[in-house]
Amino acid sequence: MGAPWRLGLALLALIGLCAAGPVFDWGLPPGVAPPPVPADNPMSPAKVALGRRLFYDADLSIDGTMACATCHEQRRGFSDGNAAHPGVNGEPGRRNPMTLANVGYFGALTWGDPRIGSLERQSIVPLTGNHPVEMGLTEQGKVLAGRLGADPCYRRLFAQAFPDGGGRIELTTIAKALAAFERTLISRDAPFDRYRRGDRAALSASAQQGMALFYGPGQDCASCHAGSLFTDAAGAPTGSLAAFHRIEPVSDRPDQGLKDITGDPADAGRFRTPSLRNVALSAPYLHDGSAPTLGEAIRRHGVMLKDTDLTDLTAFLNSLTDQGFVTDPRFSLPKPGCPAP
Ligand code: HEC
Ligand code: HEC
């Protein structure tokens, strides 16, 4: 059988290895492409394992009480049940914690700040931000590096995850490992996906009605909750304002969304389209958590809908819940103790 063919493949594999390091196994369902990965933060199993550990570690907050997972719980699609979550010093949170499914694909992150285009950049915000204070390491990235560096387990895990940089423990490598873990949070196996793969029984009649409304010209929900990730932030270029929309009349509430960043009055009340994957698990809703139910969140768009339409739309949104994702052991709290080398 075709030796040249085999040789060609071997050569290709070799070129791939030299150019991009070993190929990372994303373990994705067929037909699903992995998210883009920045050239300076290649994926590796060691880095993802480190990022997962960091994500669940309350030592990432100033007083050891708060992990990323405190506000991003797996069983809620990596969101939490509060309208807003107070930071370590009790300062009330400003916004509703977001779900993290498929974040690796989004070119615009957070509800209102188009400058935050990468996960590497984003995680610095909860760690060190002071508007509001969340994990409380304001100006103190060094405290964190010192704290983790004092732990022999972390020293080994950073050395394995960042062999080229000598395993340096600093805010940038912490952020890179967190980002690598977050890129693996891919949710593409909800009843909706099974329906699209041909399993007609995966959606109830009501959910199918809701789907027709969702994509129909009357509502056109998919003009913003676009594509298979249900947000136009997927694939948006960094800095683009295209994924920020106003769904309600501008109010005098303190959070003016995009305007707080751009200063442009026309941007008042514009927020980034949230993904709707696993949305049934992430109540309450909207940037300030002011909508307790899906029905209320939909009504707040100012749409005219009959109660039956709302029921059907809600049934459709329920079909975006991916039970495999929210129970996947790869994304859960890691076992206590240091993993074997
Ligand atoms: C105190 C609660 C809290 C903690 C702790 C927290 N987050 Fe968040 N997270 C939020 C809130 C609130 C938002 C929305 C922020 C905004 O829009 O201004 C958010 C947004 C995000 C987003 C953007 C998601 C998207 O779709 O745009 C990512 C990614 C994220 N957080 C990751 C993390 C990581 C990593 C950590 C740990 C280093 C962390 N978060 C810790 C509350 C929290
Ligand atoms: C013009 C763009 C646009 C259209 C059209 C649109 N949405 Fe939204 N949707 C948004 C934005 C932006 C938000 C967040 C608004 C906020 O937080 O204040 C949102 C929020 C939501 C939420 C809450 C999600 C969460 O995590 O908080 C749901 C549910 C939702 N939309 C469903 C729908 C449905 C169903 C339709 C069609 C009837 C629809 N949307 C049409 C832009 C849109």
Image (cartoon, rainbow, N blue to C red):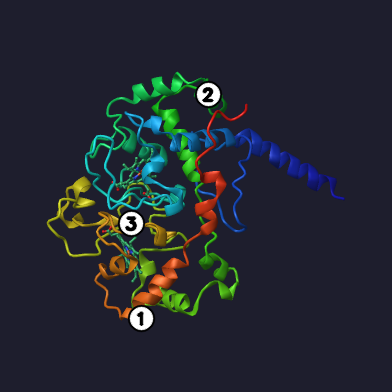
Tell me if the residue at label 2 has its CB under 8 Å from ligand 1. Answer: no
Amino acid at the residue labelled 1: Thr
In the displayed structure, does residue 173 sit left or right of residue 129? right
Mark 1 or mark 2: name the one nearer the start of the chain: 2
Q: Nearer the viewer, mark 3 or mark 2?
A: 2
User: What crowding class fits label 1: few (fewer than 14 Cα within 10 Å), some (14-19), or many (20 or more)?
Assistant: few
The quarter of the displayed image where residue 140 is located: top left
Amino acid at the residue labelled 3: Ala
Tell me what residue is drawn at x 17 percent, y 65 percent.
Answer: 249
In the displayed structure, does residue 24 sit left or right of residue 108? right
In the displayed structure, does residue 288 sit left or right of residue 187? left
Q: Which mark is residue 153?
A: 2
Tell me what residue is drawn at x 62 percent, y 44 percent.
Answer: 25
The quarter of the displayed image where residue 173 is located: top left
Instruction: Using the image, determine if residue 321 lies above or below residue 54.
Output: below
- The answer for how far apart the CA atoms under marks 3 and 2 are is 41 Å
In the displayed structure, does residue 8 sit left or right of residue 252? right
User: What crowding class fits label 2: few (fewer than 14 Cα within 10 Å), some (14-19), or many (20 or more)?
Assistant: some
Instruction: Tell whether label 2 touches label 1 (CB within 8 Å).
Output: no
Q: Nearer the viewer, mark 3 or mark 1?
A: 1
Instruction: Tell whether label 1 touches label 3 (CB within 8 Å).
Output: no
User: What crowding class fits label 3: few (fewer than 14 Cα within 10 Å), some (14-19), or many (20 or more)?
Assistant: many
Mark 3 or mark 2: name the one nearer the start of the chain: 2
Tell me what residue is drawn at x 24 percent, y 61 percent.
Answer: 246
Q: Nearer the viewer, residue 26 or 95?
A: 95
Q: Position of residue 45 (x, y in %)?
A: 58, 36
* Residue identified by numbered label 3: 243
Q: Is residue 118 visible?
A: no
Q: What element does badge 3 sit on? A: loop
Q: Position of residue 36 (x, y in %)?
A: 50, 46
Q: What element does badge 2 sit on? A: helix
- The answer for how far apart the CA atoms under marks 1 and 2 are is 55 Å
